[in-house]
Image (cartoon, rainbow, N blue to C red):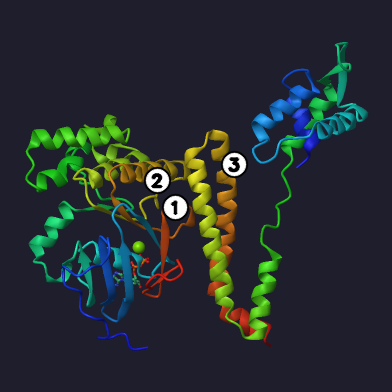
Amino acid sequence: MSFAHTVLGLLENGPAHGYDLKRVYDQHFGQDRPLHYGQVYAALARLLKKGLIEVAGTEQGDGPERKRYAITDSGVTDLHTWLGTPEAPQQYLQSTLYTKVVLALLAGRPAADVLEVQRSAHLKSMRELTRRKTEGDLAEHLICDHALFHLEADLRWLELTAARLDELATEVNR
Amino acid sequence: MSAAGTEAPPPAADEALGGTLLAARGLAKSFGPTTALERASFDIDPGEMVAVMGASGSGKTTLLHCLGGIIAPDRGWILYEGRDLGAMSESERSGLRCGDFGFLFQSGGLVPELSCLENTALPLRLNGVGRRTADARARERLESLDVDGTAHQRPGEVSGGEYQRVSLARALVAEPAILFADEPTGALDSLNEEKVMRLLVDAARRSNTAVVLVTHEARVAAYADREVTVRDGRTRDLAPGAAG
Ligand SMILES: Nc1ncnc2c1ncn2[C@@H]1O[C@H](COP(=O)(O)OP(=O)(O)O)[C@@H](O)[C@H]1O
Ligand SMILES: [Mg+2]
């Protein structure tokens, strides 16, 4: 995900200072780790250079000067394009796990146990996420749902692979 | 592996099974040439929620039907509060099914000719509760599940999500000690699935009802406290050290 695009998106609501952006970002997306100011200013510098935002005003206070940033027309277009472009499907399926299964089969170890242990761990995470989402607000809920659906996809792969172990063993040991 | 006849007989009622509400060992059940259950075991504590997972055809529904006293296993035993289900008369078992046990199925469990209120009140009426009291308690249940609007509608006139919530109201109206739920959200979309599961979990926790939740969906099983997996008619507990 492009962090700069997130900053750009936040600016579409209206001009803002860097510290406003950090506050709003942390409020919506900072569950796991709040931003550093440095990250915000680095993103702003990059957006400025590309002409996607501009400085809308500078306030002289007691401290350092404070700039207000605003999205430009080309910024709006860029944001639109970004929002409309699908993310490349990520490879959630741990190649590590596949490696473990194949290694187990090659060594004549119980490969089914590798899958079973993983399945158990996945289900445990899913229970924790379900508890978290039941107790959390809507934002928390949506974040947990996303993780849950991904874990579920992994689980399906684990179950299907478990059902195909004999077939895989034949192929691997050929 | 020789499963036949090797199970110990059920322990006497006063023998300690810990705080276990329902316990089963060595369950086997065949339908003609098909072996649906081979050697299944199960335990559940009061207020506990256990997911029964497994592929289609692995024997989940057969296990649930045995545990809930709907069908009798060919072998093995089931103790509910220390009482042997196999030693009960059919009328004792049917008494359990209208009182201590509640049932929720994937779909189609409601009587189409009755209103949703009458459907919900049915288990109470079958238990001999008077109409006024039964209706009042049924209405309370429907309200708590946010479907009191359906009270005077027929099951055929309500949405899929509402139908399952009415079914849940009926399953819980007699305040069972155990709710047996077989793929309760199998016919619902994700949003309704979540709504029904949250209501089910909330209601069960509030009344300390144990839940046997049969599902092949991990997302649904994740609401439970733990899971038991059925594979080719045999149970396997994922929790280390548990009976399997
Ligand atoms: N009433 C029945 N008559 C014949 N076969 C049955 C009956 N009930 C279940 N079976 C068979 O027993 C096996 C287990 O079925 P079931 O318990 O319904 O599995 P699940 O609920 O896990 O899909 C399947 O092969 C199924 O076809
Ligand atoms: Mg079934």
Which residue does the numbered mark 2 point to in the structure image?
B197
B52, B15: nearer the viewer: B15
Residue found at x 25% / y 50%: B109
C-alpha separation, residue under disc 3 versus residue under disc 2: 18 Å
Tell me the quarter of the image containing the C terminus of chain B: bottom left
Side of A36 where B133 appears, left or right = left
Q: In which quarter of the image is residue B115?
A: top left
What separation in Å lies between label 1 and label 2 (alpha carbons)? 7 Å
Whether ligand 2 has any atom under 8 Å from the Cβ at mark 3 is answered as: no
Label 2 residue SS: helix
On the picture, is B101 further left or further right than B58?
A: left
Counting from the top left corner in percent of width and height, residue A113 is at 55, 75
The secondary structure type at the circle numbered 1 is helix
Q: Which of marks 1 and 2 is nearer the N terminus?
A: 2
- Amino acid identity at mark 1: Val
- Image point 18% across, 36% down: which residue? B137
Q: Is mark 3 in CB contact (under 8 Å) with mark 1?
A: no
Which residue shows up at 53% across the image and 48% down it? A129
